Image (cartoon, helix red, strand yellow):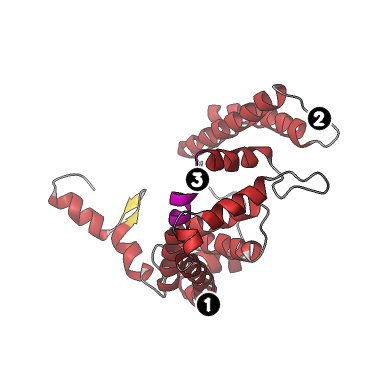
Amino acid sequence: MSTLRRWAIPIAAVAAVLLVYLVNPWIEATEPIRTFVTFGFWGLAILLTIVLFEDRKQAKGTDVEVEGPAFTRFLFNNSRAGLLWLPIRVFVGFAWLEAGLHHFSDPKWMTAGESLRGYWTNAAAIPETGRAAISFEWYRDFINVLLNSHSEGWFAIAITFGEIAVGVALIFGIMTGLSAFFGALMNMSFLLAGSASTNPVLFSLSIGLILAWKVAGYYGFDRYLLPRLGTPWRPGILVQKIAHARGAPA
């Protein structure tokens, strides 16, 4: 066992104990202990991720220990599966495009973000009876920061054009994985604010598109973009040519 792997085990054990303390319904953590434990858990989680990632450089660190089923390998890695992802990609894309165009045509949304401010106000409110729309206090604090700083104007514009951009990119298969990620991020934001609507379905489909980023846009522009642009860890043909023209190693 490598040295890094030996460090990973105790780090994971301590992080697990902190997580159990945080989510255990029979233990009510008080401030500032809860804040300390929360930061401790996330700090250890990030450290564990780094340790395990660096461990891949060790001998046999990249060996596949658990082989996935053939269907999932086909679904997420085979370009022929692009036809299966095509209708899902187009469905999610048109859902975002429709939402963006709807907001774009709403003066109360685009002019000063009045509609968005009303949405935030209702979401952050704590009713005298019943359950609040937002379950997590940290997200309510985040919404209150946006309300107090009167950020609804520029935020509404960012959401609108973000929805349109994600929709167009998914429909035409442009950087599908990245586009689906930003779509899922917006879905999660609405879900955290207590708005279900179509967000659970769109979020679930977006996760699939993210996992299938290599093939989900094959029947679209990604068929030509990905081989030419490549990835940060493996530059594509076009990036290599540009680097070679500048005299830099690709």
Locate residue 115: give its quadrant. bottom right
Where does label 2 land, which residue?
A: 28
Quadrant the N terminus occupies: top right
Where does label 1 land, which residue?
A: 87
Q: Residue at x 79, y 48 (%)?
A: 131
**Vertical comparison of 237 with 32: above or below:** below
Q: Nearer the viewer, residue 51 or 207?
A: 207
Q: Residue at x 83, y 37 (%)?
A: 25
Whether residue 128 is visible? yes
Provide the secondary structure element on which disc 1 rests: helix
Answer whether residue 152 is magenta in the image. yes
Where does label 3 land, which residue?
A: 62
Looking at the image, is mark 3 or mark 2 earlier in the sequence? Answer: 2
Answer whether residue 101 is magenta in the image. no
Q: CA distance from mark 1 to mark 3?
A: 34 Å
Q: Residue at x 82, y 49 (%)?
A: 130
What type of secondary structure mainly makes up the magenta span?
A: helix
Q: Is residue 242 left or right of residue 99?
A: left
